[in-house]
Image (spheres, coloured by chain):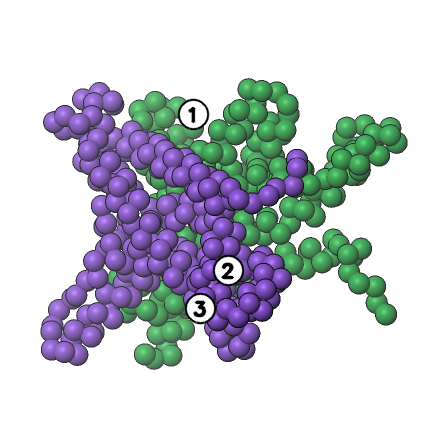
Chain colours: A purple, B green
Amino acid sequence: MSDLAIFGFGEGGWGLALLEGAAMTLLVSACGLMIGAAIGGLVAWARLSGKRLAGAVGQAYAALFRGLPELLIVYFVYFGTSTLLTETALFFGHEGFVGVPAFAAGALAVGVISGAYQAEVFRAAYLAISRGELEAAISVGMNRALMARRIILPQVMRFALPGLGNLWQVALKDSSLISVTGLAELMRVSQVGAGSTHRPFAFYLGGAVLYLVMTVLTMRVFDIAEERATRGVRRAAV
Amino acid sequence: MDIDFITKTFIRLLGALPLTLSVWFLSVVLGALVAAGVTWMRVSGVRPLELFARAYVMVFRGTPLLIQLFIVYYGLASLPAVRASVFWPFLRDAFNCAVLSLALCTAGYQAEIFRGALLAVPPGQVEAARACGMSGLLMFRRVIFPIALRHALPPYSTEMISMIKATALVSLVTLWDVMSVALKIRNDTLITYLPLILAGAIYFVVNYVIGVAFLALERRLSPHLRPRPS
């Protein structure tokens, strides 16, 4: 079979499998980014709360997960949650290994990593809100929830977009590490294809091209979102 | 969980640290050389070179390091043309492949750091150097490089730390680095957390030391920015 035919969609072609792998990569990265947003939001909130203990915990989380290798975190989350689940099951009388689904463990691992970085993005975005706006909101009698909804969140989202775009790219690339858990995302599919056709060069190169296409296309989405989010913002004349 | 097992595991993990550090050091230095070339092309003003440099950065930053590593280690080795070439004695070794692949990847990131640092040099300084009649090389050595270096240091330390983290991937191409030794111990003893936690502690301390070293260097290089002693 020629090098191009193995990427085809006909019999023996790996085209569909690779595209499905790419879709799985997008899905697991997107879930990871959202879990990361939840963690990052909490950590940023803890650090901005002004409370000593909460601030220290938030800082420790960010420092820890930015200082550990991503691969180690993936293994730790995958093996760790499975062991935890197995032991919990044993406690309730179920014997034998209970594995966490690779998808859940993978998304959680990407989220745990991304959250440590997103915390910084959200914190910086909050600090970029001008103090006058917050004072104005208080002076017109807004309570905290209303102020968060009307004044803080819209601006934090706007200021955080460029940083989140970078972190999306990081999440997309980190998701390739989930292949070690056996989840059939793009990296894993490329590995399986490489193994069963004995053409690692073609498969890994094809996989890399798909990753590049995904990165470039999704960054375009972030560019458009940024353009939309800042359409009402006056810019200094360049 | 006995203390004996902890110390034994820790010593075994530390034994793998030299490999992790040598992959890191060699790839970072080699990457800096490649990055210098890529940056030079990017700012050369020659259109084809500039396009090549842009493409280089996009490809190596837009794809996961893991797949780049597998292209070099598994991919190239599977091509008969490579096996017959003069590069084969070099490429057949997993260590060389790991260093090469990590270096090419970090070069993409380092080139952007270098470019940003060059752009941050105030044009007035360059004009002043020209007005004094400095030649290109002298101007680079005395004016551009010292200023650019100070701008490059903070992002450079981040890149050094992320390269330490990236070396964990070489465990997937048969090398015995800290990560793979931790996994081996986990496999042999079926103890989940401890080997991974100890390995994590080693990586964390190494990264901490690198961060502190860069901060110290930054401080040393910017005495003019410190408040004067009262």
Q: Is residue B90 above or below residue A59?
A: above
Q: Mark 3 or 1, which is nearer the eye? A: 3
Which quarter of the image is occupied by the N terminus of chain A? Answer: top left
What residue is shown at x 50% (from left), y 60% (from top)?
A152
- Measured from the top left, where is residue A46 in percent x and y? 48, 70
Q: Are marks 3 and 1 on the same chain?
A: no
What residue is shown at x 57% (from left), y 22% (from top)?
B49
Tag 3's secondary structure?
helix
Tag 1's secondary structure?
loop
Q: Mark 1 or 2, which is nearer the eye? A: 2
Callouts 1 and 2 close, C-beta under 8 Å? no
Report if residue B50 is visible in the image. yes
Tag 2's secondary structure?
helix
Q: Is B150 on the left-hand or right-hand side of A175?
A: right
Residue A107 vs residue B197, the one in the foreground: A107
Q: CA distance from mark 3 to mark 1?
A: 68 Å
Mark 2 Cα within 10 Å, few/some/many (few <14, many 20+)?
some
Dot 3 amino acid type: Ala
Question: For mark 1, what is the residue?
Answer: B86
Report if residue B73 is visible in the image. no
Callouts 3 and 1 close, C-beta under 8 Å? no
What chain is tagged by disc 2? A
Question: For mark 3, what is the residue?
Answer: A145
Tally of numbered discs: 3
Q: Are marks 3 and 2 on the same chain?
A: yes
Question: For mark 2, what is the residue?
Answer: A151
Dot 1 amino acid type: Val
Q: Is B21 on the left-hand or right-hand side of A115?
A: right
- Measured from the top left, where is residue B192 in percent x and y? 29, 67
Residue A39 vs residue B63, the one in the foreground: A39
Residue A207 placement: quadrant: top left
What residue is shown at x 28% (from left), y 69% (from top)?
B191
